[in-house]
Amino acid sequence: MKQVVQNYKSGELAVLDVPVPGCKPGGVLVRSAFSLISTGTELMKVSEAGMSMLGKARSRPDQVAKVMQSVATNGVPATYRKVMGKLDSYTPLGYSLCGVVEQVGTGIDDVKVGDLVACAGNEHALHAELNWVPKNLYAPVPDGLAPRHAAFGTVGSIAMQGVRQGEPQLGEVALVIGLGLIGQLVVQLLAAAGVRVVGTDPDPVRCELAERLGAAACGDPASAAVGAAVAKLTDGHGVDQVYLAAGGGSNQPVELAARLCRDRGRVVDIGKCRLDLPWNAYYEKELDVRFSRSYGPGRYDPEYELEGRDYPIGYVRWTERRNLACFLDLVARGSVDVEPLVSHIADFDDAVETYQRLKDGELKAVAVLFRYPEQKEEAGEAQAPAVAVPAVKRPTGGAPTPARSAKTAVRLAFVGAGNYATSMLLPHLAQRDGVELSTVVTTTALSAANAQRKFGFAEATTDLDAVLGDTSIDAVFVVTRHSSHAELTRKALLAGKTVFVEKPLALTEDELAGVLAAVEESGNDRLQVGFNRRFAPLLQEARKRFGARTGPASLRYLVNAGRLGHGSWYLQQGTEGSRFAGEGGHFVDTASWLLEADPVSVYAVATSGNEDLQVVLRYPDGSTATISYVTTGAAGFPKETLDLIADGKVLRLDDFVRASVFVDGGVGRKRWVSSRLPKARDKGQSAELAAFIKAVRTGGPMPVPLESLVATTSATLAVQAGLVGGAPVTLARAR
């Protein structure tokens, strides 16, 4: 299928061939009929992409701060790869469309194939021939409403949420500053609510259009006409509400709002404009400044948008979806007229030319629609007490993976192409001789296309079953969200593939048992989990310098994990498990590797709110490892520090940039310190991948025994049981 994309680094716009998105549960696959260009938001994004790197940084200081924090945590090279990888990627455009339901995912019963729906979301209602849209981001189109009019649903919801924030009442007077697409819709919604409206915009054509659509008076903000109209309609008191629907860097809108608003009036910010509030003016009138967040309640809440969890109507009357349905109803009944706003309808194939004409100012428009071709394409389908460590039953059937010729490339498939895969795994594999990146599989079309372009995959698809059925593929990498790891690993093992799954292997004991059942059923035990730290060169050298030990050891591992940003999917504990369940296996595995055994018990305690964890692992020879996993530490402190103490020796690791070993000798002390700081924090990904590829090529043992992977996973999962039970958890069958 085709999709409109932009490269944020170069500013290039393109209509790209990408895989058809899969139809996941909880949503529908929609074939676009019309999609709407947001001439404000989208053109701002297009313009930003054309800026220099310095200009981009100045326009997004919030992102610059994140980059600097990443440098402190991960080092310059890793941060550079991550940032440039994001910049030099195609990003989607669009967020408002109307189309026909082509496929219905499980759990959906309110629409059927062939129904017309309006769709919202900058990840789901894109300028693309097909989109997968979750339940709370679409609404059925009322009978008789034209598809091109229903395509206004999202921007209409944005305008409606802004109006709701202003709490207009019958007979009030409102001022709308900025008469672009959102401003024109705000004018009509206010008029439909019985509010008299004054509009202002430097463009006389837009002023005339707003008056035709219900405004009492409109004019240039620099003229005296607007103030005169407000004085006449309000007996000199000033307007009850001001709606800021303008963009740009001028502070004129907020100054005008203060001047024309009545005492204790309301100012609602809908657009992205400068907000340098003149303190005296806003203080003296005690103006109520409010913000309108996009389409309404539910926006930016993944449980609402992605998981379909609605808010009870008794508590939240107007959600994103209810706003969308309400706006469609108003248009269908003629209370809002969007046809006069349509300045231009372009064929979808002419998308790049249309954006360029808008950017250059050649095409003057309030609203522009893309019209999609009607030809059909085949849509792809997608789809506290003692804790026993599951016994690893070795395969009863199946032959070991045969050795391969050194001249034959190892063919790999990737399931998932997110930040970690594209910054920490694929750069190493793309440069490795004897490796062929065969296929990348994602649920979103554009991420697969980006990975294919940047790393040279032969194919990009959303069809997992086709990849698992491809006998030419030697190994499958599972690099998706945590909740899908166990099931995808199970499927790949049953398909006879060698599997590399990023941590965690499983989020529950049942999931772990399912993976081991697949090993027994298929006769395929070729599995590696991405516990990379044991492969870190600095830690490998330090362990060698530390040498063998004779007595029990004490190990302390401080993980200064830090707080997650708002909206991180790691916070979705209902589906993705706890944060420690997701990444704690790294630290358990490192401790077990250093102590050369698997733990026999786990004891865990947490601070109030479970923000900081203390996990104590006990080993068969009496050794202990304490993992302090904290989120409340200072961001500038190293992320990982480790001390191993035994037999008069101490191994110290400082965040994978320096290591030391102290040894008491017969005539004094010996000390080894890593000779120089490495160029970057090497946490072992490259060496781990090299060991995995060697195992695939030669048919030799996997880099980490399956028993160890299972023991580490069970110990990680036992932490939650320990927190609930408040007592040590015994791990049966530990070796």
Image (cartoon, rainbow, N blue to C red):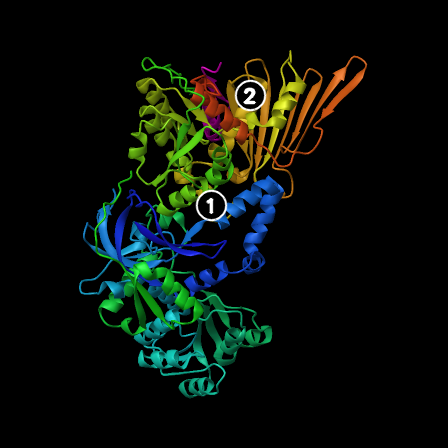
Q: Is residue 11 above or below residue 417?
A: below
Q: Position of residue 167 (x, y in %)?
A: 39, 69
Q: In the displayed structure, does residue 407 sit left or right of residue 556?
A: left
Judging from the image, what secondary structure is the residue with disc 1 in? loop
Q: Which mark is residue 593?
A: 2
Give, as a three-letter code, the residue at label 1: Ser
User: Which residue sits at x=24%, y=62%?
Assistant: 147
Q: Is residue 129 magenta?
A: no
Q: Quadrant of residue 485?
A: top left
User: Which residue sits at x=63%, y=34%?
Assistant: 655
Q: Which residues are magenta?
A: 712-735
Q: Is residue 703 above or below residue 20?
A: above
Q: Position of residue 430 (x, y in %)?
A: 47, 35
How far, Cα to Cα, is label 1 from label 2? 30 Å
Name the residue that disc number 1 marks. Answer: 568
How would you rate the neighbour count of disc 1 (Cα within 10 Å): few for under 14, some for 14-19, many for 20 or more? few
N-terminal-most mark, 1 or 2: 1
**Nearest to the observer: residue 610 or residue 123:** 123
How would you rate the neighbour count of disc 2 (Cα within 10 Å): few for under 14, some for 14-19, many for 20 or more? some
Q: Position of residue 96 (x, y in %)?
A: 33, 59
